[in-house]
Amino acid sequence: MPRARRTTRPEARREEILEAALELFAERGYRGASLALIAERVGLTQQGLLHYFPTKERLLVEVLALRDERDTAHLWPHGGLDALPAIVELNTQRRGMVQSYTVLSADSVTEDHPARDFFTGRYERLREAVAAMVREDPGVVLPEGMSAEDAAAMLIAVMDGLQLQWLLSGGDIDMTGVVRGALALLRRSP
Amino acid sequence: MPRARRTTRPEARREEILEAALELFAERGYRGASLALIAERVGLTQQGLLHYFPTKERLLVEVLALRDERDTAHLWPHGGLDALPAIVELNTQRRGMVQSYTVLSADSVTEDHPARDFFTGRYERLREAVAAMVREDPGVVLPEGMSAEDAAAMLIAVMDGLQLQWLLSGGDIDMTGVVRGALALLRRSP
DNA sequence: GTCTATACCCTGATAGAC
DNA sequence: GTCTATCAGGGTATAGAC
């Protein structure tokens, strides 16, 4: 039986790198975060990092894929519309995560951005999921001319837009309260 | 009397540069847009550009100041809450402008970003202005626990969040309709 | 699996000629 | 007012030793 490895297990290393990359993309955006900086944060050289992820673009894609898998899988399937304020409340405890999505999603609309497809698909799926919640909620009464899809787009927009204001205000905005308010608006009848 | 100048007037040149800079910041973000690229777009070298704006940071600040002056001055003072869907409708005709604000505002939450203060201040002023509109609107009935400031934060968030979805969907989202819907929600009584 | 060395390009900024 | 020349620094990525 061989001695315990001197070095970290490859899968663990990969996870460490993905973690550090997400942090740095959040702090400085995709273009502003260099491979060397990410590598340094896990005690590697830039070239050592490239052993695990052949290109920077590849690294970003894998970061997003991992996060999507973990987050979306755990948070979204449970419950109806009231899961939304719950998620928002959780997010107030995870500034880094909020910032990474805010920065990277806006980043992704720029030219030839590697995360473009990821976010386009993500929002399509998100709108569909939230529209279903809206339709199934017994309390919701939509005003004339507003479809369930419109309401879904609105709710997602509220959450995203609040995150930006929250980040810029240094946490001074009551995200959860406002999202609860938005739900209350949808649930009262004329 | 001297002959007409061979070169462009300095103020006109400055405006040209600011225009090109805004475009390129929108297309590639602040860090992704190089001085050389901006200069090229107005037929200058990078060094020629630096004659007008001593640093890149300075250029960004002036771009934002100019835009803020023009846009905010013209659009915001008129009318009450119904100015909001009107602005959104106008924005569907100005993709570049929408993209520049979406990209730069999110960009600005990253480390040591020169536009950070600009956007922090902008949102504070915006919330205050919209909160006043909410208070003065005769039709608005707020649900329990939602202040005029909360409603303002929500409306601004809806507009910002929709812009991101709109940009990512290739213009497929009906921004104006959803914002009208949000106003309708605020204006119906329980 | 991680390193050193290196190729090659782009960055913002300065100095000084014209 | 705009250029050429140049600087010091950083970027991603490859080749190959250990």
Image (spheres, coloured by chain):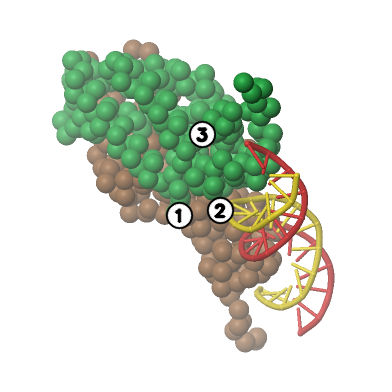
Chain colours: A green, B brown, C red, D yellow
Q: Which residue is mark 2?
A: B32
**Quadrant placement of the C terminus of chain A:** top left
The reply to whether residue A18 is in sight is yes
The reply to whether residue B137 is in sight is no
How far, Cα to Cα, is label 2 from label 3? 18 Å
Residue at the (62%, 21%) spot, across then down: A1
Q: Chain of mark 3?
A: A
- A55 up-or-down from B7: above or below: above
Element at label 3: helix
Residue type pointed to by label 2: Gly
Left or right of A172: which side holds B169? left
Number of other residues with Cα within 10 Å of mark 2, as a class: few under 14, some 14 to 19, many 20 or more: some
Q: Are marks 3 and 1 in contact (CB under 8 Å)?
A: no
Q: Are marks 1 and 2 in contact (CB under 8 Å)?
A: yes
Left or right of B97: which side holds A147? left
Left or right of B48: which side holds A111? left
Which numbered disc, 3 or 1, marks the residue that appears first in the sequence?
A: 3
Q: Which mark is residue A129?
A: none
Q: Which residue is mark 3?
A: A100
Tell if the residue under mark 1 belongs to the same chain as the one under mark 2: no
